[in-house]
């Protein structure tokens, strides 16, 4: 398999592009002081060049991140390319691409549902249907989805609905005869110089080996910024029309309203939806759970790409609107060096006030399996996976390592008495426990937004475990990373 080669975006200083370095620094201050907001990476592009970029250690530029529903926007991009090639017709019915299901789908609204309707999350259903669709007796989620009668006429009502995107993904896969990554490689990744090799990009697949479309994409932050820049430029890259002419305008305009009772708390979810793309208070955005963003700002000739672990997406958007967007046109001519130094030294919090931990070779059992069971069943499974055992032992490059068992392949990571230490796609920080007793070990799965906190009691040989944010997809812990196949 050939892969696209990486070509970096050009770089310049903020002042060279009329951007305020002090304004970007104010944004960094704001997110650092806001509870629940934990950024992992930031790339700011202005006038086609990167003017600011940073990764909060232990995160690094080379690592891909699970971007959750940003995947939807990549699926929609594949759809646009397939439409231009005559493979897919937006005005054809979804059912027409699944002729084997024709006899099973009898509801007239379901039968009339068009590709453009599911692209706009306007299938006619008033709520998420994934759980119900997964209960289909044949195990075919698309069959299950199409057999759920829409509440309203397709095209008339918005509901964020994973099977809509899954249907798009399978339509592109069926008509092109290839997976989404393979389809996008020569049409998107190669023209933009995005490395899509294993370890740099991956996509979670279903049991049939198909990318699920609605989530599961792992990609680097600079790759996100490049795709955002392509949209900003109307689908043109280095003078070549990479996306079909007119697709960006079509995909980013409001196709269905998204007003809801939560509009006051989440105003950026009430401004309308395009084809798998949200409209925003400023511009439009690709949007993933836990605040993964590609924000395209045509009025500022800018793109902002961010990954994070933030439970409420609006919290980070509020800081972007308040601090980062004004900085894009502030026209300041100073502070570049100070900002560059700060961006180079970003890190997740490093705990030092509790003193230095002491390691002893010990095996630990859970305080209560029910307590430490994570509430994230694998899609379609009936039981949740749990952290079942933890061991600290001598070994590894730092002299000590932790073994985390969940009934599958163990996660093994190095431990150090201070700061973050990285082992492959996992990083740890060890401190004395909250009462300066026992150990607290923060375990970060670097290719996802998520962190696991372990509290260890060496005297009682017990542990407790909790997710900072619970993963929405969870294979065995050792597979919490970009798929390598």
Image (cartoon, rainbow, N blue to C red):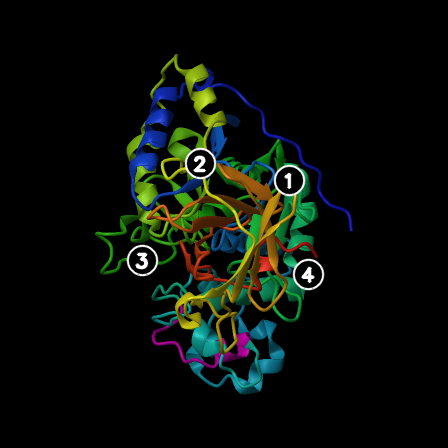
What distance separates the C-alpha of mark 2 from that of mark 1? 17 Å
Residue 84 appears anywhere in the view: no
Write down the residue under mark 2.
304
Contact between marks 1 and 3 (CB within 8 A): the answer is no
Residue 467 appears anywhere in the view: yes
Write down the residue under mark 1.
194
| Badge nearest the viewer, 2 or 4 | 2
Q: Earlier in the sequence, mark 4 or mark 3?
A: 4
Q: Position of residue 39 (x, y in %)?
A: 42, 40
Q: Position of residue 214 (x, y in %)?
A: 51, 60
Residue at position x 70%, y 60% from top? Answer: 178
What's the mark number on residue 176? 4
The C terminus, quarter of image:
bottom right
Q: Earlier in the sequence, mark 4 or mark 1?
A: 4
Contact between marks 4 and 1 (CB within 8 A): the answer is no
**Residue 48 sits above or below residue 368 on the image:** above
Count neighbours of disc 2 (C-alpha within 10 A) and say few if under 14, some if 14 to 19, many if 20 or more: many
Residue stretch rendered in magenta on the structure: 141-154
Q: Secondary structure at mark 3?
A: loop
Write down the residue under mark 3.
258
What distance separates the C-alpha of mark 2 from that of mark 4? 32 Å
Q: Is residue 166 left or right of residue 280?
A: right
Q: Secondary structure at mark 4?
A: helix
């Amino acid at each position: 398999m050939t892969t696209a080669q990486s070509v970096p975006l050009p770089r310049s200083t903020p002042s060279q592009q009329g951007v305020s370095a002090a304004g970007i620094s104010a944004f960094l201050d704001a997110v650092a002081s806001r509870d629940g907001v934990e950024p992992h990476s930031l790339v700011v592009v202005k006038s086609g060049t990167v003017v600011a970029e940073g990764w909060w250690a232990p995160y690094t530029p080379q690592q891909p991140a699970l971007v959750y529903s940003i995947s939807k926007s990549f699926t929609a991009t594949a759809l646009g390319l397939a439409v231009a090639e005559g493979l897919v017709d937006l005005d054809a019915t979804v059912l027409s691409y699944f002729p084997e299901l024709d006899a099973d789908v009898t509801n007239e609204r379901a039968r009339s549902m068009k590709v453009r309707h599911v692209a706009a999350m306007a299938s006619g259903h008033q709520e998420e249907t994934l759980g119900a669709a997964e209960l289909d007796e044949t195990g075919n989620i698309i069959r299950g989805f199409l057999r759920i009668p829409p509440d309203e006429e397709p095209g008339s009502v918005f509901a964020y609905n994973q099977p809509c995107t899954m249907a798009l993904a399978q339509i592109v896969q069926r008509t092109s005869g290839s997976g989404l990554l393979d389809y996008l490689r020569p049409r998107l990744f190669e023209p933009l110089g995005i490395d899509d090799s294993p370890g740099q990009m991956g996509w979670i697949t279903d049991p049939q080996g198909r990318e699920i479309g609605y989530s599961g994409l792992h990609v680097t932050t600079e790759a996100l910024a490049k795709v955002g820049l392509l949209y900003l430029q109307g689908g043109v890259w280095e003078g070549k029309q990479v996306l079909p002419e007119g697709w960006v305008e079509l995909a980013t305009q409001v196709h269905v309203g998204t007003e809801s009772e939560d509009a006051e708390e989440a105003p950026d979810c009430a401004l309308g939806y395009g084809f798998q793309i949200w409209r925003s208070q400023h511009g439009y955005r690709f949007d993933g759970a836990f605040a993964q963003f590609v924000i395209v700002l045509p009025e500022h000739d800018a793109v902002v790409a961010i990954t994070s672990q933030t439970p409420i997406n609006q919290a980070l958007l509020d800081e972007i609107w308040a601090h980062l967007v004004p900085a894009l046109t502030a026209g300041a001519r100073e502070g570049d060096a100070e900002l560059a130094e700060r961006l180079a030294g970003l890190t997740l919090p490093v705990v030092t006030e509790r003193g230095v931990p002491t390691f002893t070779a010990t095996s630990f059992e859970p305080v209560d399996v029910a307590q430490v069971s994570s509430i994230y069943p694998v899609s379609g499974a009936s039981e949740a996976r749990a952290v079942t055992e933890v061991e600290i032992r001598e070994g590894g490059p730092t002299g000590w390592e932790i073994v985390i068992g969940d009934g599958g392949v163990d996660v093994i990571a190095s431990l150090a008495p201070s700061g973050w230490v990285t082992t492959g796609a996992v990083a740890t920080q060890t401190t004395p426990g909250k009462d300066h007793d026992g150990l607290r070990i923060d375990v970060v799965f670097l290719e996802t937004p998520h962190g696991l906190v372990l509290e260890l009691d060496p005297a009682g040989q017990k542990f407790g475990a909790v997710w900072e944010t619970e993963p929405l997809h969870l294979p065995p812990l050792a597979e919490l990373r970009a798929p390598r196949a």
